[in-house]
Structures are given as structure tokens and as C-alpha cells.
Image (cartoon, coloured by chain):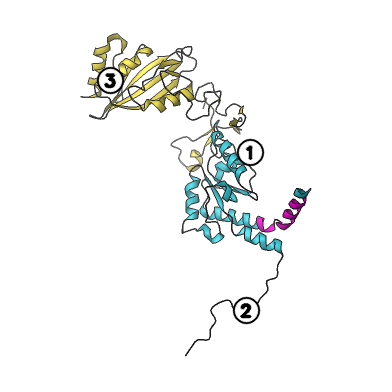
Chain colours: A cyan, B yellow
Amino acid sequence: MQSQTEYGYNSKIEGDIVLTTVDAALAWFRANSVWPMPMGLACCAIELMAVGASRFDISRFGSEVMRFSPRQSDCMIVAGTVTYKMAGSLKRIYDQMAEPKWVIAMGACASTGGMYRSYATLQGVDNIVPVDVYVSGCPPRPEAVLDALMKIQEKIKKEPVLHDLVAFKQLAGK
Amino acid sequence: MTALESANQIKARFGDLVSEPAEFRGEITLKIANAEKIFDVCSFAKSIGFDYLVDITSIDNYGEYPRWTVLYHLRAIGNGTDFRLKIDVSEEKSEIPSVLPIWRTANWHEREIYDMMGIRFRGHPDLRRILMWEGYPHHPLRKDFPLAGKPTDLPGVAFTRVTPMEGGPFVTVAGGKDAIDREPRVRTPED
């Protein structure tokens, strides 16, 4: 006996229409495809690797595509101690990232300089780039990094997308 | 051959230039009277088997004369013995011969001392800073350099600001009976 089951998209069950605004849809796309720029500078970077590996699995949040090119990434995760010598390069990489972009300061060192109160260490990466989420810990647990990522997602979902684009087009047209 | 025998061999070769081998906790140190002769002493040390330059370190005897002490830690891989060579350098001179032709590893050691302490090495082919950036005006490991740093600015390259110490530095004291005792705390030098 032949089966009558349809295995594809079933319009009778799932319907034809999704009601939303374009803005909300675009924000949803953005929030679930945040490609990180892993700025691994110290031991926090090891923990960041754990976030990417199977046990914690950052790909559950659409962020498994660690991009080592600033042109392709959306969210810089500053994982580790930022020295003054590195600060210039970090700022340059941030400037090269395309808008829209976000920054997570992962751990005590990236947030405040941590235990390195010395002549060589930048006392918090927010001195040179705008930080969206700070993660406490030395180093933070992988769950904490995922929590930070979820907070970024919530933030992205609230940000207007189309409204800004229209305003930008109008501005560019003038 | 033990380290002491090697040290005596060097003493026999150079005479008054080299002090009697000083032994402390099983480690031998030779003091070289003239810092300019360090290259010759090192060449001879290598010729009798000390083929590995473990490290070069420097000390700031701030407030005393001569201000700098430079130490060469040598090891003979062949028989596993090691000893130190010690030279004094005055602040006015702040220059000694490079031992890079003898051990190539001296390259980065000497650059680090130049960066952190400001002692120059004559004959070094590439005496640039190794940790701080080119153009940084201070030598941070000197005793008269504050731990919090000094403000500098090199536009487009790097800047530094004075670090807020918040009453620190905070130090742990070893051997505290519980976690409260061992917690890092402000400790003034008088304590």
C-alpha cells in the first residue's frame, strides 16, 4: 500500500502567511547570525575555544562562524588582557569591521584591566572601543559568554534596522 | 668536570680580571672586574664547553654606584654544569659589548635588557625594543620608574596613561593560617 503522507512543506498544516514587520524579521535574521571576531589575547581565549567546541556549542546561537577577518564579522569578543602595544591594532581591527557591530568585553582584564595594574596594560577595552556587554570572571565560564551573546541578541532584536536604513538613504541622497 | 673546576679554569686563564668563585647554595658566581672584557671571558667559557647561554639578566642598584649589574647564566649541556658571570656597569656608560657572536640566543636577551633597563649593547646588529614599542620614552624596569607608569602618547602607534592603583599594590603574605589572612592586602614597606 502506498503512503499518502506528504513529506515537504504542508500548507494545510503550516499555513501560508507569517505576520510580522520587515524590521522585526530583519532584526531576527541579524540576531541569529552574529559572526564573532575572536580577539583572543590571553587565557580567556582558551575558554572562548571551549565555547565554540561541542560541549557548549556556540552554533546553537548561530555564532559558530568565527571570522578572523574583521570585514566578515559582526561582534568582536575581546578575550584577554589588552596591552597598550596591542591597543592600536585592536582599535584598527574594530574600525575595519563593517556596521552594524558589537563588542563583548570578556573577563576582568578586557573589562577593567583586571589584576594587571601596571604601566603596560590598558585599563579596560572601553577606553578605545564601545563595549555592549561586559562579562565578569577570570576567566569567565563558557556559559557566561553564551549569556553575553544572548544579551547581545536581545539588544539586536530591539534595534530598528529598516528605519535606520531609510534614514541613511535619505541622508545619502541629499 | 664540575662547575667549580670550570670556574677555576677561567680564573686561571684571566687572573686578576676574574674574582675567586663565590659559591652560594651550590651555585657558582664569578665577578668580572672590567665589563669591557666580558666578550673575551664568554668566548673562553664557550671554548671549554659552556655552549648554552641560559639567560642574561640585569639589576638596578638604585642609589648605589655603579648602578647596573648584568648577569650571564651559562650552562654546559655536555655535563650539565652551570655558573654565572657578573659585571658592573655605571649609569654614565650604560654600554657593554654584545655577546651575540658567541651565542645567537643573546639577541633577544640583550634587546629585552635594552628595552626594560636601558643598557645598550655595542655590536648588536638589531638593538630595538622587544616588549614596548619603538618610540616609548621610558625604561620600565628601572627602580625610579613608578609601577603605575607614566603618561605617554605616540599618535597612531600607542599611548599609555597612569594606572589608578586604588591604594595598591596588593600583596599576599605566604603562610597565612586561613583564607582571610592570605587574601591580597595593601602592605606598606615598613610592615
Q: Residue at x 54, y 61 (%)?
A: A60
The residue tagged with tag 1: helix, strand or loop? helix
Q: Are marks 2 and 3 in contact (CB under 8 Å)?
A: no
Pointer 1 residue: A127
How far is disc 3 from disc 1 in space, using C-alphas? Answer: 51 Å
Mark 2 falls within which chain?
Answer: A
The residue tagged with tag 2: helix, strand or loop? helix
Q: Residue at x 62, y 77 (%)?
A: A14
Q: Earlier in the sequence, mark 2 or mark 1?
A: 2
The residue lying toward the viewer, choosing from B72 and A158, is A158
| Residue A133 in view in this figure | no
Mark 3 falls within which chain?
Answer: B
The residue lying toward the viewer, choosing from B164 and A78, is A78
Pointer 3 residue: B45
Is disc 2 in the same subunit as disc 3?
no
How far is disc 2 from disc 1 in space, using C-alphas? Answer: 53 Å
Q: Quadrant of residue A30?
A: bottom right
Q: Quadrant of residue B149?
A: top right
Compared with B93, B74 (above or below) is below
Residue B68 position, x and y percent, is 44, 17
Q: Residue furthest top?
A: B16
Q: Nearer the viewer, mark 2 or mark 1?
A: 2
Residue B139 position, x and y percent, is 52, 23
| Numbered tag placed on residue A11 in the rendering | 2
Callout 1, which amino acid?
Asn
